[in-house]
Amino acid sequence: MAKPSRLAVKVRRKDKKNVSEGVIFIYSTFNNTLVTVADRQGNTLAWSSSGVLGFKGSRKSTPFAAQSALSDAVTKAKEHGLRKVEVRVSGPGPGREAALRALTSLELDVTKVLDTTPLPHNGCKPPKRRRV
């Protein structure tokens, strides 16, 4: 079968948005930490996670992996001109505090820090305790 010609393939390039204000979403689970940087309307500018950076298994859930994920996502977002951010932290994982501490060293103006972790009003029964 013949290969399609190079001229027929359309290349879609990412357009660089110039955004000065944004929101950083930090979602920390017991197994991983996900960081998403979006503009005020919710359009994603950059994202990163511990697993994307090469951490595997139990090392994904470490505070250092969360710190690395945050700095990676913010450096990608700074290419769009990000300066002022609001931070929303969600989840019970060990990467929450480390990611917030890493944020102070990244020369961003933090306007607000919100904890959006969903708390049950005595909802589902939690999983049983591990016996090791």
Image (tube, grey):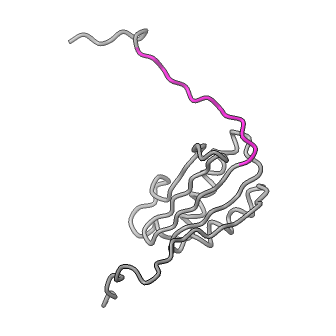
Question: Percent from the top left, x then y, of residue 107?
Answer: 78, 55
Question: Percent from the top left, x then y, of residue 79?
Answer: 69, 40
Q: Is residue 118 above or below residue 80?
A: below
| Magenta stretch: includes residue 20 | yes
Q: Is residue 112 above or below residue 124?
A: above
| Magenta stretch: includes residue 119 | no
x 40%, y 80%: residue: 123
Q: Quadrant of the C terminus?
A: bottom left
Residue most extreme to the left: 1
Residue most extreme to the bottom: 131
Question: In this picture, which residue range is highlighted in magenta?
Answer: 9-21
x 55%, y 49%: residue: 47
> How many dots with numbers?
0
State the residue in front, 63 or 116.
Answer: 116
x 56%, y 70%: residue: 63
Question: Percent from the top left, x then y, of residue 57?
Answer: 38, 66
Secondary structure mostly seen in the magenta stretch: loop
Q: Is residue 34 left or right of residue 130?
A: right
Q: Quadrant of the N terminus?
A: top left
Q: Is residue 114 left or right of residue 1?
A: right
Q: Is residue 1 left or right of residue 15?
A: left
Q: Quadrant of residue 78?
A: top right
x 60%, y 47%: residue: 42
